[in-house]
């Protein structure tokens, strides 16, 4: 028997027959494995995240979806094997045991190195191949469920855009009383207005929270229960992992994993990036 779960432990076995088939051909009698299933284009580059997600959670027309969006499973960790928990076993030994039973084409690509230049080159190749970046794991690290800790580091490309704040939501918890979650937009010359690309509260320091709460209230044009709407005058530099299609926003594009790098008081809204620049980046990442 093979069962497949998402990281949030939702069962998706019926949705991903490719993963089930791989599991049935592995030599392990009983195992818990961790991996990722990617939808790949004909050139081997990964499809956008939301395309891959169309395969998960579907229980109807699975074979039709499989033909349209085939998945390739890649495994990268082994947590339990034939009655023995491996989560306290060092990563190097877990991966060795994994490699003994998994076909090389279904193992995640990796290098073992302490050389910074080798890592930079591997990251460059990963991004050139259409991936988000790398995961660096200490060879002696245990497996800690739901938590990377300092033994595992996610290394991602960082693209930036200069965007304009359109609104902000009041914070919660320790950010209560501060305007925190920023609504970010770019100028659309055809529509002659700013169009929203997403929200983020990531990257904001206490000093930035104090500054933006005072300044945004000075620019307020209206509000509802949670959100203060402002004149589009403040420019921020926003780092993000990539862009994705989104029906939620007017331009059909949304930021993924956005975080604020800082305010750009040297730039006027007219000098910020336009939706045309956003589309250029979006099209480039799809090639």
Image (spheres, rainbow, N blue to C red):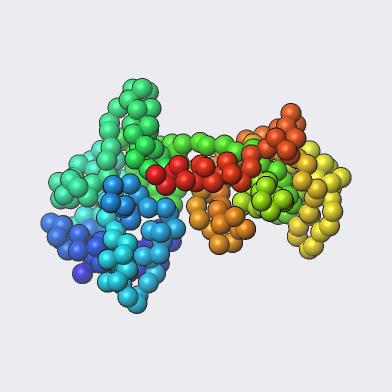
Asked if residue 133 is positioned above or below residue 5 in the image, the reply reads: above
Tell me which corner region of the image, top left, top right, bottom left or bottom right, holds residue 65: bottom left
Instruction: Say if 75 sits above or below 163 in the image.
Output: below
Q: Is residue 105 visible?
A: yes
Q: Is residue 82 left or right of residue 150?
A: left
Q: Position of residue 78 (x, y in %)?
A: 26, 50
Question: Which of 99 and 260 lies nearest the eye of the viewer?
Answer: 260
Left or right relative to 108: residue 24:
left
Answer whether residue 203 is visible to the viewer in this image.
no
Tell me where residue 20 sits by quadrant: bottom left
Residue lying furthest right: 218
For residue 233, which quarter of the picture?
Answer: top right
**For this rendering, which residue is in front, 169 or 164?**
164
Residue 102, position in %: x, y? Answer: 18, 50
Q: Residue reaching furthest front?
A: 190
* Identity of the residue drawn at 59% across and 61% down: 248
Total label count? 0
| Coordinates of residue 89 in the picture (x, y in percent) | 28, 43
Q: Residue at x 20, y 59 (%)?
A: 22
The single residue placed furthest to the bottom in the displayed view is: 60
Q: Identify whether 200 is placed above or below 22.
A: above
x 79%, y 38%: residue? 211
Which image quarter holds the C terminus?
A: top left
């Amino acid at each position: 028997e093979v069962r497949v779960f998402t990281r949030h432990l939702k069962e998706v076995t019926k949705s991903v027959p490719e993963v089930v088939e791989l599991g049935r051909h592995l030599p392990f009698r009983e195992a818990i494995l961790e991996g990722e299933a990617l939808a790949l284009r004909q050139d081997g580059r990964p499809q956008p995240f939301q395309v891959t997600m169309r395969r998960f959670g579907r229980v109807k027309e699975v074979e039709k979806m499989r033909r349209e969006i085939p998945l390739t499973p890649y495994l990268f960790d082994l947590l339990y094997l034939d009655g023995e928990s491996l989560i306290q076993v060092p990563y190097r030994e877990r991966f060795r045991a994994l490699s003994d039973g998994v076909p090389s084409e279904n193992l995640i690509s990796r290098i073992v190195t302490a050389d910074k230049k080798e890592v930079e080159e591997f990251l460059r190749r990963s991004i050139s191949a259409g991936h988000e970046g790398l995961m660096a794991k200490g060879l002696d690290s245990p497996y800690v469920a739901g938590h990377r800790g300092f033994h595992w580091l996610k290394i991602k490309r960082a693209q930036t855009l200069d965007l304009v704040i359109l609104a902000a939501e009041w914070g919660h918890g320790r950010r209560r009383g501060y305007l925190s979650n920023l609504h970010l937009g770019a100028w659309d010359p055809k529509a002659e207005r700013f169009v929203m690309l997403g929200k983020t509260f990531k990257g904001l320091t206490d000093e930035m929270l104090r500054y933006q709460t005072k300044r945004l209230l000075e620019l307020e044009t209206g509000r509802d229960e949670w959100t203060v709407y402002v004149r589009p005058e403040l420019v921020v530099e926003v780092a993000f992992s990539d862009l994705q299609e989104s029906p939620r926003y007017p331009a059909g594009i949304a930021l993924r994993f956005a975080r604020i790098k800082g305010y750009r008081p040297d730039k006027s809204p007219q000098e910020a990036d336009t939706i045309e620049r956003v589309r250029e980046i979006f099209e480039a990442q799809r090639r």
